Image (spheres, rainbow, N blue to C red):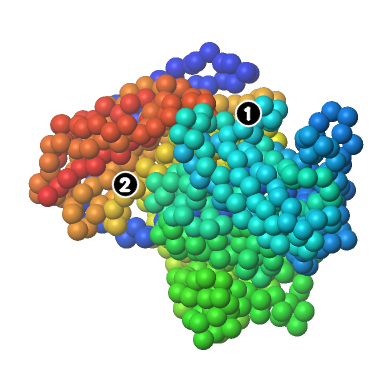
Amino acid sequence: MNLAKKITFRACVATCGLLPLIAVAQNKPKLTLNLKQPIAKVSPRLYGLMTEEINYSYDGGIYGELIRNRSFKDNHEKPDHWTIVKAANDSSSISLDADHPVNSALPVSLKLKALGSDVIAGIANDGFWGIPVKPSTTYRGSFYAFTENQEKATINLSIESKDGKKVYARSVVSGLGKSWQKFEYTFSTPADAVPTADTRLVLRPQSPGNYYFSLVSLFPPTFNSRPNGNRQDIMQLLSDMRPSFLRLPGGNYLEGGLFSTRFDWKKTLGPIDHRPGHMGTWGYRSSDGLGLLEYLEWCEDLHMEPLLAVFAGYALNGDYLEEGPLLKPFVDDALEEIEYVIGDTTTKWGKKRAQDGHPQPFKLHYVEVGNEDGFDKSKSYNGRFNQFADGIKAKYPNLQVIATMGGKDWLGTRYQFDAKKADVVDEHYYRNAFDMESDADHYDKYDRNGPKVFVGEWATREGSPTPNFNSALGDAAWMTGMERNSDIVVMSCSAPLFVNVNPGGMQWESDLIGYNTLNSYGSPSYYAQQLFNIYKGDEIIGIEGSNIPTQIQKLNHKDSLASVKPKNYPGLFYVATRNSKTGTIFLKLVNCLPSVQNIDLELSGIGNVKAVAKVIALKAEKPEDTNTITDPRKIVPQNSTFKGVKKSFSYPLSAYSITVLQIETR
Ligand code: AHR
């Protein structure tokens, strides 16, 4: 039958100049699952996480530190985020001081000239959009200080409201002398404390004088109670996704704007007071409190493997080093970094890791050389990659080396790259829902003899700061394609992972998880990805689809001006996997259409099937619906059961939904 005859069109009234048209196939869609013979194995590392310092992902994000600009290095001219707290008419002052370094990593301090008689002036930090006050909570902090004037001075500390009228917790340290000392303190909030971020940390000397402060730090309880650890709620959200790996440390953050601002892993090790920090690539400094070991411990806490990306001699400003002797120190640096991760304690860098508190080597299978080297206009990646791959393979033959070029994405094909030394190629896709859905069969067409693919960054980018349900539909459609082809798509991770939703927190829109100072939430895309990862088997089941309903491309203003002809593409997506041990089938169905789809399902090639299936569904009333920091659970997976499973049965698939049918066959 000719397509034009087979399809009826329903036109919806357009808003915002868009012209959405939905085309629906007249016959019932049918999916036949061929359960006799799986087509391939599902990659055990199919779904992971990607991370970098962007959108206040670490400082002001997952890293537990509550004090912003704790080392006074954010601005050379003034102590950003620090203010003086003093009575009216008091001429006390604060200023940056470079004459009394604590050490080379802490060259600057904050000088407080505290005057006053009844009320002595103090210093206040406004945190990352406030300091989170929660009931019955113990906070642990430290700071360096000395005073010019007296021995045994005392400092009172408090977490208080921004206007100073309400004090939520107090602490005190004494014994400040005339040279730098490190002091520790704790705060405990009462059980009836009402959660608030309208707060500041204040340090107030008990007597007038000149005081100097450096590295003022404060941590809430952290995940697994790690010192210098991570925020509990965000770690829990990640843990609930059950990711298999963490791609670290970037992204652009790996490369740096300049060679000097790359992720220089050696400078991120050891006690935090020996970490100089560096300018990140997204417009703000990084404390490097979350350094290489913390990344690895983050992996350990969530039972993920690190996927280590190493700096490959190219920075974002276009500076690069050709293959050859000048690049060798960077290859050696990468080998040392790998040794830090997996070397035993008889190796130089394994020993250093043990000194840093982790004698046990970490597991590592994949090392990525660089990031998005298709942007390197010098086209030097062929030589650079080969030199790194040769060096890595010579010392660590079992490691799989990933190239950032050689894939079929825009960057991978930007110039000729010889990928023969690459075990895996990294492809990146940032798109709208139409692009994701209309290209969901992307990997069906890949050469089975070509390199394995790591989809190292991908996302449907609709919705801000976090993606909306239309993005989740785009993501889910795209994941059906990756999962069905996970014999070649061995790993994938969407990006960016995090966004601090406070004003000024975002540099990149549509990020998987949002948070402010007190709370965090998963976007609809977060739940779609969680659902895809949790509900999957280890073997891929072939599905034959017929009468698949279609949708018609919504044209935007630009398309309309360019007289683009709207494209017809599927509105229903699917993939099935099976657990080879239990026989459980996980059938994922994605309905991007505004109407219920009654789908005929045939389970071909099995003996028994249980009538009752578990159903896990993520739905929305309209594609624009979303979760927000104030309405964080509007769209979350709902569990139910379906009682009519047979070898042939019909299933009513909800409009705008992402559904897993968990069917038992034994
Ligand atoms: O995910 C945001 C950025 O997108 C990454 O840093 C970079 O690799 C890509 O261009």
Q: Are marks 2 and 1 in contact (CB under 8 Å)?
A: no
- Residue 147 versus residue 421 in the image, above or below: above
Alpha-carbon span between mark 2 and mark 1: 48 Å
Q: Residues within 10 Å of mark 1 (few under 14, many from 20)?
A: few
Q: Which residue is mark 2?
A: 535
Q: Image check: 592 left or right of 378?
A: left
Q: Is residue 640 visible?
A: yes
Coordinates of residue 125 in the picture (x, y in percent): 71, 41
Residue at the spot of label 1: 166
What amino acid type should be assigned to the residue bearing mark 1?
Lys
**Is residue 497 visible in this depiction of the protein?**
no
- How many dots with numbers? 2
Front one among 639 and 549: 639
Residue 117 drawn at (x, y percent): 82, 37
The quadrant the N terminus occupies is: top left
Tag on residue 65?
Answer: none
Residue positioned 57% across, 31% down in the render: 196
| 235 and 103: which is toward the camera | 103
Q: Secondary structure at mark 2?
A: loop
Residue at (84%, 48%) from the top-left corner? Answer: 209
Q: Position of residue 33 (x, y in %)?
A: 24, 45
Per the image, label 1 sits on a secondary structure element best described as loop
